[in-house]
C-alpha cells in the first residue's frame, strides 16, 4: 500500500511535435503511459507544450505590422490550438482516470467563452479521476508572447488536494509575480508547479526561491526544442531557420524541497520522464519557523484580494 505522505512525481521533459496538435497529444499520451508504468501519481508537462511555444516571433520579425509570415503562422497556430469544449483533451483525461494519475499540462487554449478566435497560454489540472479541475490562463504574457497570446484572468488561481498535498501552479514568468504566488499560498498550496517553455536560465533561480519563500516543494518542468525539431511542413520554415539557433530550449526541469535545496538539479538536454518521490512531512518541518500565510503573516496590515471570476466579453441574461 502506498503511504499517504509520499507522492511519486514525473517531470515530462519533452519536445512537442511543434505546431502539430495531434502529434503532440500522442507524445503526451506516451509519457503518461510511461509514468503509470513507473507508478507515478502526478505527471507535469511544460508551458504551451500542446502545440508548442511561439518561437517564430523572435525569429521572423514578429512585431512587424501586417506581415504575411506572421499572419500565416498565427493562423496555423490557432488551427493547432486546444479547444477543451470540443473534447481535445478527452483522451488525456481518460488516461488519467485509467491510471489514477493526476496531470498538469501546458496548452495553447482557444476557448469558446472568449469567442473562439484568440489563444491563451493555459495550465490545465486533471485529477486522478480524469476530471479537469482548473484551467489557469496565464495572467500576463511576456514580451513577444503578447503578439500571439491573450492575457488571462484569475479563475484558474486554484489549488487541488492530492493525497496529503495541496497543489497549485503558474505559467513561466508569472512565477515571478508575488501576488499570484501569494494567492496560491493562501489557499493552502504546499506543492507548487511552475511550467516553462524551456531552459535552465528560467528554472535555476526561481525554483529554489519559491521553495524557500513558501516552505513548499516546487516542481519546475520545461520543454526541449532544437532546430531539427521543427517539422518540415511548418509554414515559412526557411524564414524561421534563417535566425534559429541550434538549441532553442535545453530543458532545465528540476525540483526543490521545502528548505529551498535541490532534490533534483536542473536536467539539461535529456528527453523523457524524470522521477522523484516527495515526502509531505518535510513541509510541516519547514513550516515550523516560517509560514508566509500562517504564523508569519499579518493580515491586519496587508491582505490580498483575488478575483476568480472567469472573464468574458458578453453576459447572456435570457439563456438563449
Image (cartoon, rainbow, N blue to C red):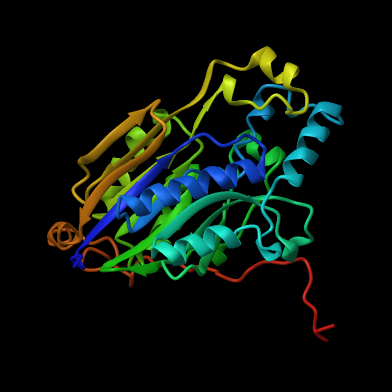
Residue drawn at point x = 27 percent, y = 60 percent: 292
In the drawing, does residue 177 fall left or right of residue 51? left
Quarter of the C terminus within the rendering: bottom right
Q: Can residue 212 be seen by looking at this rendering?
A: no
Query: Quadrant of the rendered structure where residue 5 is?
Result: bottom left
Viewer-side residue, 41 vs 83: 41
| Residue 213: % across, % down | 28, 50
| Residue 284: % across, % down | 16, 63
Is residue 287 depicted above or below 73 in this figure? below
| Residue 192: % across, % down | 35, 54
In the drawing, does residue 220 fall left or right of residue 265? right
In the drawing, does residue 139 fall left or right of residue 240? left
Residue drawn at point x = 67 percent, y = 37 percent: 19
Query: Quadrant of the rendered structure where residue 189 is?
Result: bottom left
Toward the bottom, the furthest residue is 318
Residue drawn at point x = 12 percent, y = 62 percent: 288
Viewer-side residue, 113 vs 17: 17
Is residue 223 depicted above or below 241 in this figure? below
Q: Say how many tags the image has.
A: 0
Is residue 80 depicted above or below 316 in this figure? above
Q: Can residue 19 be seen by looking at this rendering?
A: yes
| Residue 84: % across, % down | 65, 61
Toward the top, the furthest residue is 242
Viewer-side residue, 290 vs 244: 244
Quarter of the N terminus within the rendering: bottom left
Viewer-side residue, 17 vs 279: 17
Amino acid at each position: 500500500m502506498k503511504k499517504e505522505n509520499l507522492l511519486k512525481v514525473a517531470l515530462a521533459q519533452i519536445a512537442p511535435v511543434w505546431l502539430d496538435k495531434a502529434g503532440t497529444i500522442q507524445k503526451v499520451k506516451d509519457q503518461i503511459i510511461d509514468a503509470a508504468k513507473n507508478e507515478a501519481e502526478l505527471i507535469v508537462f511544460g508551458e504551451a507544450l500542446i502545440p508548442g511555444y511561439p518561437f517564430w516571433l523572435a525569429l521572423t520579425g514578429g512585431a512587424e505590422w501586417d506581415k504575411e509570415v506572421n499572419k500565416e503562422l498565427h493562423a496555423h497556430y490557432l488551427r493547432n490550438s486546444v479547444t477543451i469544449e470540443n473534447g481535445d483533451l478527452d483522451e488525456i483525461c481518460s488516461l488519467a482516470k485509467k491510471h489514477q494519475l493526476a496531470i498538469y499540462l501546458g496548452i495553447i487554449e482557444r476557448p469558446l467563452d472568449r469567442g473562439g478566435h484568440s489563444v491563451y497560454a493555459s495550465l490545465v489540472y486533471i485529477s486522478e479521476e480524469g476530471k479537469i479541475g482548473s484551467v489557469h490562463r496565464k495572467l500576463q504574457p511576456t514580451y513577444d508572447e503578447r503578439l500571439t497570446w491573450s492575457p488571462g484572468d484569475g479563475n484558474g488561481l486554484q489549488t487541488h488536494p492530492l493525497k496529503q498535498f495541496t497543489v497549485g501552479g503558474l505559467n513561466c514568468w508569472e512565477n515571478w509575480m508575488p501576488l499570484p504566488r501569494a494567492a496560491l499560498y493562501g489557499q493552502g498550496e504546499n506543492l507548487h508547479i511552475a511550467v516553462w517553455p524551456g531552459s535552465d536560465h528560467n528554472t535555476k533561480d526561481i525554483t529554489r526561491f519559491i521553495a524557500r519563500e513558501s516552505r513548499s516543494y516546487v516542481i519546475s518542468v520545461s520543454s526541449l526544442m532544437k532546430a531539427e525539431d521543427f517539422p518540415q511542413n511548418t509554414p515559412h520554415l526557411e524564414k524561421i531557420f534563417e535566425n534559429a539557433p541550434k538549441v532553442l530550449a535545453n530543458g532545465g526541469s528540476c525540483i526543490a524541497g521545502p528548505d529551498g535545496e535541490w532534490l533534483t538539479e536542473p536536467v539539461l538536454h535529456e528527453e523523457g520522464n524524470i522521477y522523484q518521490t516527495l515526502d509531505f512531512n518535510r513541509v510541516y518541518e519547514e513550516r515550523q519557523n516560517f509560514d508566509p500565510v500562517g504564523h508569519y503573516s499579518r493580515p491586519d496590515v496587508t491582505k490580498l484580494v483575488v478575483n476568480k471570476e472567469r472573464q468574458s466579453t458578453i453576459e447572456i441574461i435570457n439563456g438563449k
